[in-house]
Amino acid sequence: MKFFVDTANLQEIQEAHDLGVLDGVTTNPSLMAKEGIFGHDNVMAHYKQICEIVDGDISAEVIATDFDGMVREGELLAELHPNIVVKVPMTREGVKAIRHFSERGIKTNCTLVFSAGQAILAAKAGATYVSPFVGRLDDVSTDGLQLIEQIVHIYGNYGYQTQVLAASVRHVMHLVQCAELGADVVTCPLSVITGLLNHPLTDIGLQKFLADHAKGNK
Ligand code: E4P
């Protein structure tokens, strides 16, 4: 399973990269705004910086909601770097744009997916990734992980090449359960990735090993 970090913060991206387990990055307009990145040139420059840190797929989302606008923006984004994946919302125009990009060899990430039907459409349109939002479904009392299971099963039935990118992954157990269910990728905050390190018995065990070792050196 690939690990993507879900942030536009360069320090966090660098930290995740330095850990040696990072496969890519996802961003969205809210994450870009959180970092204070606004305006076409600044946005483009920021994506370029991310591409310089991480040698893996970097999702950059279009802002336009009409087909022509999405195509214009997506083509500019794709020209920035070969690792850019154009992130397109699951809408009627978005599905058409995904088909357009996939016919031209431009990678896409179909975002804001909340149902199996939407995931089937994304695969039919030729999306490289589909992003079901686990946490946001949980937020409205619907089982987000069940959707991951359903999509993995359906894609398996037909051998769809679209990769299941579990998004809105909020905690360590989400990540572990996505791995059990066979998601191809998870995207999550850095804290979820580093949270995988934690176990009290590891800390206690290490303290004991070091203490015993120190006894011999007295
Ligand atoms: C997906 O690509 C989104 O950027 C992200 O995972 C959304 O997560 P959130 O629901 O925690 O905002």
Image: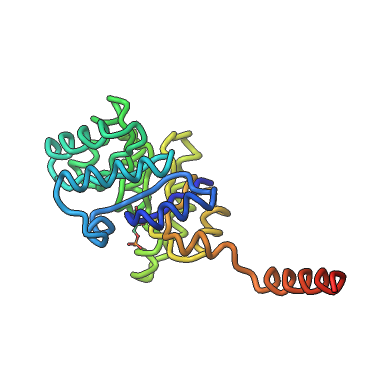
What is the x, y in percent for residue 187? 42, 53
Front-lying residue, 64 or 45: 45
- Quadrant (top left, top right, bottom left, bottom right) of the C terminus: bottom right
Can I make out residue 92 in this image? yes
Q: Nearer the viewer, residue 181 or 85?
A: 85
- In the displayed structure image, the side of residue 38 where residue 173 appears, left or right: right
Task: Single out the residue that lies furthest toward the front.
Answer: 218
Residue 72: quarter of image: top left
Q: Which residue is drawn at 68% across and 71% down?
A: 203
**Which x, y percent locates residue 126?**
34, 33
- Asked if residue 40 lies left or right of residue 149, the reply is left
> In the figure, 130 relative to 208: above or below?
above
Q: Which residue is rendered at x = 30% and y = 35% of the image?
A: 125
Task: Tell me where residue 44 sits by quadrant.
Answer: top left
The residue that appears at 47% across and 49% down in the rendered structure is 17
Location of residue 154 in the rendering, given as x and y in whole percent from the top left corner: 46, 43
Q: Image height check: is 26 above or below 78?
A: below
